[in-house]
Amino acid sequence: MMDMEKVVFAGSRSYTLGVELEFQILDQHTLDLVPRAPALLARIEPELSDRVAPEFIRSIIEIQTGICATVDQVGRDLRQTIELVEEIAAGQDCLLYSASLHPFAEPADQVLSLGERYRRIMDELQRVGRQFISQGLHVHVGVSDREAAIRVCDILQIYLPIFLGLSCSSPFFRGEDTGLDSYRTKLFEALPLAGIAGYLGSWQAYVDEIAMLRNNSIIQQPRDLWWDVRPSPAFGTVEIRACDLPARFEEVLGLTSLMQALVAAIVEEIVKPLPVSPQLLCANKWQAARHGLQGHFCDPLGLLPTTTQNIGSAARELIDRLEPWLARFGGRGLAAIEHLLDHGNSSTRQRQYLHTYGGFPAMIHAMQEQYWQQDRDEM
């Protein structure tokens, strides 16, 4: 087995944050995906070049923060970069759109980005990879100790369906209603080494898993494991990757606040890790992807007062349970999460707008225009 020191967990200041958002780039007139990421990236000021990155197709652009101590700092960092990229996009006759799947774009029409890693991945994935034209929210939370990072992953994966239910934003694909609140989740699960990691138990078990996969030429590096939550050894973080891309900026910050608080609570031993049936984990995840906030959720560890309930109710109990940590860190964006619980997630709102306005272009405009809104009823 691999020597533990060959996979080094860098460690970082506890509960620091890094957030990544993957935006769609749409033509202002047709509202279809357009491969203009290279044109946008070419106009980014050098001092912000580490905040904006290409993705594997040229109609997606990633905006990311630096290392942030608080969610307020995340908000300032993201807002500065998003507004800059929005301005550049307008000059290129396009706009940014925040959802995890475009409602009518065709995967076969998308232009792949350059780069050896993307070429290698797409050569392996073939048609499965070409279908994966989705976007997501990734949140890194700093953890100082590698064993604590594994404990966080083992416990946090049980509660990821709550975060997914809150963030669902991909009900449509190739012009059809999929019947799911997060079809992105099911597309992602078609990829190898993606989805639920299962119980690890210790840093040594994680390192042994990495060694086995490397020795059998299945992965080249830990980041080739596209788990819903995973240790990020190079950054000294736990990376949470299960969410769709929220529809509103304040929802991004609210979810980040909840993630930061839950990671801190787990590190400070609010509940003990235990192996959990993979079937239960898969069932909870399916319920979130299929039904969103109305999905059925079972809590096998007893973190929440109610063992079985719908995901919306579980989210409210989680917020209450994390109140001491949310109060400590500030709880930015929680009003947007409460508003979402009262009025529906992005998938619900997309369906409402499609019904109201009768077409995808009007739906996209309605969703895109509310990105910067806070806590306002729109229906």
Image (cartoon, helix red, strand yellow):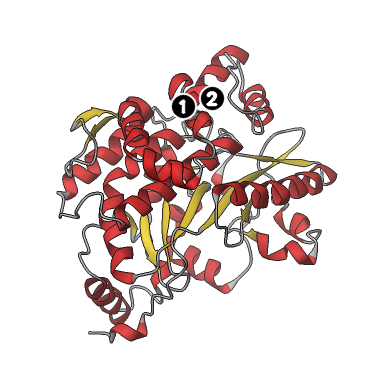
Precedes in sequence: disc 2 or disc 1: 1
Looking at the image, the residue that sits furthest to the right is 91
| Label 2 close to label 1 by CB (< 8 Å) | no
Q: Which residue is mark 2?
A: 350
Q: Which residue is mark 1?
A: 338
Q: Is residue 214 left or right of residue 57?
A: left
| Residue nearer the viewer, 341 or 2 | 341
Vertical placement of residue 207 versus 254, above or below = below
- Disc 2: CA contacts within 10 A as few (<14), some (14-19) or many (>=20): many
Query: At 54% across and 14% down in the image, what residue appears?
Result: 355
Locate residue 236, reporting x and y percent.
43, 69
Residue depth check, mark 2 versus mark 1: number of the one nearer the observer? 1
| Residue nearer the viewer, 39 or 255 | 255
Give the residue type that dot 2 points to.
Gln
| Residue nearer the viewer, 101 or 199 | 199
Vertical placement of residue 176 versus 262, above or below = above
Give the residue type that dot 1 points to.
Glu
Mark 1, secondary structure of its residue: helix
Locate residue 123, reporting x and y percent.
48, 66
Task: State whether residue 192 appears in this view.
Answer: yes
Task: State whether residue 190 appears in this view.
Answer: no
Q: Is residue 65 left or right of residue 225?
A: right
Q: Quadrant of residue 125?
A: bottom left
